[in-house]
């Protein structure tokens, strides 16, 4: 399986009810999320499947900014008018973990024209709420401790409780 053909594997596994193949393919996609998401076929996945990937703690990326950019690309290259609906934008962008981004990365996000809409502003306001600060510090410390104690690669799950 490769980043170029994994979405076809997933489609076939779903079509023929191959649950083990489906589970393994989804795991592969989560491990290689950014390269898979850059394929043309990725923009045709359903909103439910895309949100399933975004909400999975096993999703791996170098930064959450990359995940944000993929979410924007998926929304903007839509073949379906429902992707531009405020509730879809809110649902997708609400799954990005903004608390894992640096101040510089957040500045990059605020400069995007899509974020001028009400749905996006709501998502960003909630993500920047002071109540999240204590949780973010706790998550960061747990991540540092985990990285010091193990040699496993880090994924988003280690940064979240």
Image (cartoon, rainbow, N blue to C red):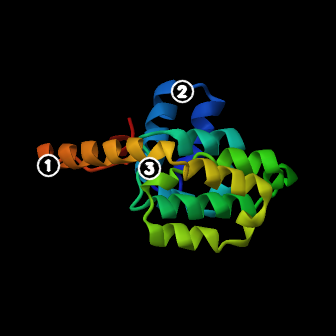
Residue 46 visible somewhere in the drawing: no
Q: Secondary structure at mark 2?
A: loop
Is there CB contact under 8 Å for labels 2 and 3? no
Quarter holding residue 158: top left
Q: Earlier in the sequence, mark 1 or mark 2?
A: 2
Q: Name the residue at the left extreme.
A: 149
Side (left or right) of 119 relative to 157: right
Quick check: 28 above or below 124? Answer: above
Q: Which residue is mark 2?
A: 18
Q: Position of residue 85 (x, y in %)?
A: 83, 51
Using the image as rendered, state which of residue 23 and residue 91 is in the foreground: 91
Using the image as rendered, state which of residue 120 and residue 154 is in the foreground: 120
Q: Residues within 10 Å of mark 3 (few under 14, many from 20)?
A: few
Q: Earlier in the sequence, mark 2 or mark 3?
A: 3
Using the image as rendered, state which of residue 113 and residue 6 is in the foreground: 113
Residue 148, labelled with which disc? Answer: 1
Residue under the point 62% across and 42% down: 51
Q: Secondary structure at mark 1?
A: helix
Q: Which residue is mark 3?
A: 1
Q: Position of residue 105 (x, y in %)?
A: 49, 69
Side (left or right) of 114 relative to 26: right
């Amino acid at each position: 399986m490769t980043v170029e053909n994994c979405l076809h594997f997933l489609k076939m596994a779903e079509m023929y009810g191959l649950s083990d193949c489906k589970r393994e393919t989804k795991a592969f996609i989560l491990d290689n999320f950014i390269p898979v998401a850059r394929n043309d076929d990725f923009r045709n996945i359903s909103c439910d499947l895309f949100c399933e990937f975004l909400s999975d703690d096993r999703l791996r990326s170098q930064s959450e900014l990359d995940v944000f950019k993929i979410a924007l690309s998926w929304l903007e290259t839509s073949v379906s008018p429902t992707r531009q609906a405020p509730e879809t934008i809110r649902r997708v962008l609400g799954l990005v973990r903004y608390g894992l981004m640096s101040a510089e990365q957040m500045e990059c996000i605020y400069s995007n024209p899509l974020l001028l809409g009400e749905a996006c502003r709501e998502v960003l306001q909630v993500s920047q709420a002071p109540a999240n600060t204590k949780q973010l510090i706790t998550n960061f410390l747990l991540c540092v401790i985990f990285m010091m104690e193990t040699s496993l690669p880090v994924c988003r799950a280690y940064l979240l409780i």
